[in-house]
Image (cartoon, rainbow, N blue to C red):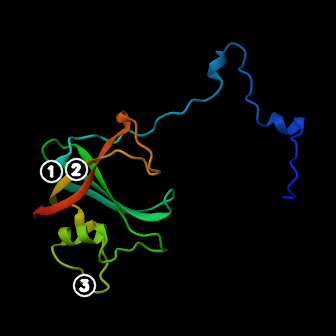
Amino acid sequence: MNGKRTELEPAQLRDFRVKAPEEGTQPHSFAPEPICEEAPYPRYEPGIYEAECVEARNYWDRQFRSWKCALRFSILQSGDPILRFLHLGSHKKPDAPPRSEYRRDWIIANGAQPRKRQALSPRVFVGKIYEIRVGDVQKRFDGREHPTPSIYSVVREIVRRTYP
């Protein structure tokens, strides 16, 4: 980069142009349209619910460049799904220090503190019933407000384990 602005040659510009529609097609049909592949996250009335954890997994979130744990719950009264996302650090391996939400929730699920060097597996959550606090996500990751139809619900807190 020498600070000089270079102009694109006509041959280079051709690569950026949208091709004209083929004969016999509608003018607007030649450019592909985005397709929504996922169902929207559900929205529930904020409050306390009983729910069973049916799935738990750790994963690397490329957008936030950090480890996350996703807990999928099924609300007992309706069978509706709801998620809880927990932060596990941005190091080479997932991390759950003593004051983290993951560790707090893991202790509730396990019923005891972890031993030194014990793996804090997300499997401990699955198959148990919890009292959960549900709340709305009203802001995007960048702090901007969600439009009202985009607001969705998540598990804000695992209050206590109720069974087994």
**Image coordinates for residue 95, horizontal then vertical, percent:** 39, 74
User: Residue at coordinates 32% horizontally, 85% vertically from top-left?
Assistant: 117
Q: Is mark 3 on a helix, strand or loop?
A: loop
Q: Which comes before the other along the chain, label 3 or label 1?
A: 1
| Three-letter residue code for mark 1 | Ile
User: Residue at coordinates 30% horizontally, 60% vertically from top-left?
Assistant: 56
User: Residue at coordinates 26% horizontally, 55% vertically from top-left?
Assistant: 156
Check disc 1 and report the residue beneath it: 48
In-image side of 46 versus 141 (left or right): left
Q: Which comes before the other along the chain, label 3 or label 2?
A: 3
Quadrant of the frame with the C terminus: bottom left
In-image side of 82 versus 78 (left or right): right
Check disc 3 and report the residue beneath it: 115
Towards the viewer: 116 or 155: 155
Numbered label tally: 3
Which residue is outermost to the top? 24
10 Å crowding of disc 3: few (<14), some (14-19), many (20+): few
**Image coordinates for residue 163, horizontal then vertical, percent:** 10, 62
Q: Is mark 2 on a helix, strand or loop?
A: strand
User: Residue at coordinates 72% horizontally, 19% vertically from top-left?
Assistant: 22
Q: In this view, does 15 lie above or below 135?
A: above
Tell me how far mark 3 sits from mark 1, CA to CA. Answer: 31 Å
Circles 1, 2 touching at the beta carbon (< 8 Å): yes
Tell me how far mark 3 sits from mark 2, CA to CA. Answer: 30 Å
Check disc 2 and report the residue beneath it: 134
